């Protein structure tokens, strides 16, 4: 509802602006000449062009951030898998160490895992 109200208010403001700026201007873009264009259309065209360029830049930045996040997620998953493998290997070595100590007749350490 608030967006509808905001749209209506901005539309009325632009309509008022357009009725006040009906003078015709010529726009030169390189060798092209666009003549007798109302001033409000030049301003509206500039605003729309700026919004499109800003949206495109935002899209590229968002895409870049998304790719970076996905890359970091993959690295994190790989690191977690490596940690799990190292933990399994450490546990196997602790079991083997305990077996070797019992075969050698050494006392068991109460604080061992």
Image (tube, rainbow, N blue to C red):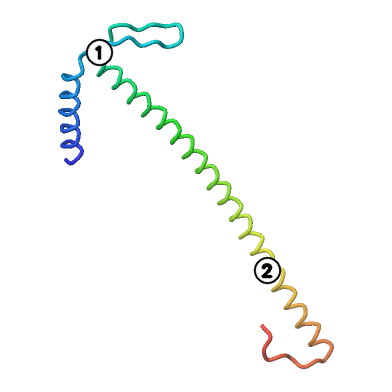
The local crowd at label 1, few if under 14, some if 14 to 19, many if 20 or more residues have their Cα within 10 Å, is some
Q: Quadrant of the C terminus?
A: bottom right
> Quadrant of residue 78 in the image?
bottom right
Q: Position of residue 15 (x, y in %)?
A: 17, 23
Q: Position of residue 63 (x, y in %)?
A: 49, 38
Identify the residue under disc 1.
38
Of the image marks 1 and 2, the number of the one nearer the N terminus: 1
- Give the answer, above or below, for where 31 lies relative to 50: above
Q: Quadrant of the N terminus?
A: top left
Relative placement, left or right, of 112 versus 7 is: right
Identify the residue under disc 2.
88
Residue furthest out toward the right: 104
- Give the answer, above or below, for where 71 lies relative to 82: above
Q: Position of residue 102 (x, y in %)?
A: 79, 88
Relative placement, left or right, of 83 versus 61 is: right
Q: CA distance from mark 1 to mark 2?
A: 75 Å
Viewer-nearest residue: 113 or 6: 6
- Which residue appears at 48% of the width and 38% of the height? 61
> Quadrant of residue 33 in the image?
top left
């Amino acid at each position: 509802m608030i967006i509808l109200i905001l749209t209506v208010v901005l539309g009325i403001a632009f309509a008022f602006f357009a009725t006040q700026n009906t003078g015709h201007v010529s726009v030169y873009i390189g060798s092209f000449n666009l003549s007798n264009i109302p001033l409000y259309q030049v301003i509206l065209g500039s605003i729309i062009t700026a919004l499109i360029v800003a949206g495109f830049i935002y899209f590229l930045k968002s895409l870049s951030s998304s790719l970076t996040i996905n890359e970091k997620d993959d690295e994190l998953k790989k690191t977690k898998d490596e940690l799990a493998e190292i933990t399994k290997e450490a546990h196997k070595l602790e079991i083997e160490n305990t077996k070797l100590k019992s075969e050698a007749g050494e006392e068991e350490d109460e604080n061992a895992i």
